[in-house]
Image (cartoon, rainbow, N blue to C red):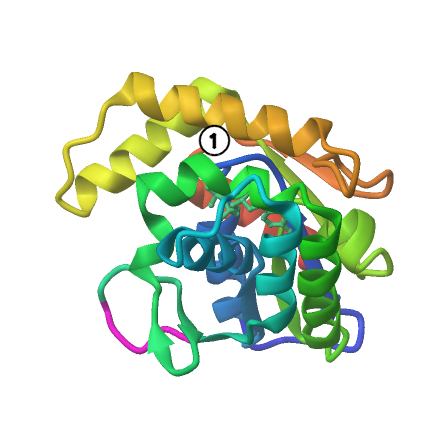
Amino acid sequence: MNNITSQTPSVIAIDGPAASGKSTIGLRLAEALGYIFFDTGVMYRAITFLALERDIDIHDEAAVTTLAEETQIDVAPASKPDGRACDVLVGGRDITWETRTRKVDENVSIVAAYAGVRKALSRQQRRIGQRGRIVMVGRDIGTVVLPDADLKIYLDATAEERARRRYDEIVARGGSPDYDAILKRVVERDHIDSTRDVAPLKAAEDAVVLDSDKLTADEVFEQILALVK
Ligand code: CDP
């Protein structure tokens, strides 16, 4: 898309539950607009991975918060064509795939519920987001991180459909996942994310809610492009 005008939204927030397709659609939209793509979930995943690796008790809020405050996470454009949306780097170390393991999936929502962790990571996200020409994806971008975003989208789908998509993704990467286990994790993560005290998952009042259950990825993308133009 090369007809970007002063009317084109500069800061675009896409929020929604686990595996709702935010990252795929967000990356595609950013590429079409020539914008930066920023998946904020990778920051929560990076802290979770590091805590597990360093044997920090995930339930020790103070210790996990200190880790989040002291860790510089860099998110860079994908350096390898191996299915990643971006590189996740800590101190120059590439931890992109380490943040996608089942263990991280099982623990990330616990980490993301800590107020101090959210404060440390939201601050970094806001600084990046405010520069504009960005598609930022997460759970609380339109509500908390960038409440003044020019366009807010809330991408939804049933848990079963989202679990099926995550299942297909893992199969495409050569894995042999268990659908029921994926569904269980999706439901658990949604529950923790939407009932936490700080920045719970919900649509901003001024968000456009898109239910993607009966839509293909192309159809979702077309609907979002129509909102952007
Ligand atoms: O890609 P997927 O939907 O599985 O999850 P993600 O976007 O990578 O986010 C992983 C977890 O990080 C979520 O389940 C939330 O607990 C947390 N998160 C958050 O709390 N706030 C954000 N802005 C982004 C992610």
Let me know if residue 79 is in the magenta part: yes
Q: Quadrant of the C terminus?
A: bottom right
State the residue lying farthest toward the bottom.
92
Question: Can you give x and y, in whole percent of width and height, for residue 87 in the image?
Answer: 39, 71
Determine the residue positioned at 35% across, 40% down.
103
Determine the residue positioned at 36% across, 56% down.
53
Main SS of the magenta part reads: loop
Please state the total of marks drawn on the protein image: 1
Work out whether residue 222 or residue 210 is closer to the camera in this orientation and state it.
Answer: 210
Left or right of 148, for residue 131: left
Work out whether residue 193 or residue 67 is closer to the camera in this orientation and state it.
Answer: 67
Reading the image, the residue beneath label 1 is: 215
Left or right of 15, for residue 93: left
Left or right of 69, for residue 164: left
Q: Against 112, is 118 above or below?
A: below
Determine the residue positioned at 55% across, 54% down.
44
Can residue 214 be seen here? The reply is no
Determine the residue positioned at 81% across, 41% down.
204
Q: Residue 208 lies in what quarter of the image?
A: top right
Residue kind at label 1, given as amino acid type:
Leu
Q: Residue 117 lies in what quarter of the image?
A: bottom right
Q: Against 128, is 105 above or below?
A: above
The region drawn magenta spans: 77-81
Question: Can you give x and y, in whole percent of width and height, for residue 63 in the image?
Answer: 60, 55
Can residue 144 be seen here? The reply is yes
Q: Residue 121 lies in what quarter of the image?
A: bottom right
Question: Can you give x and y, in whole percent of width and height, for residue 160 in the image?
Answer: 43, 18
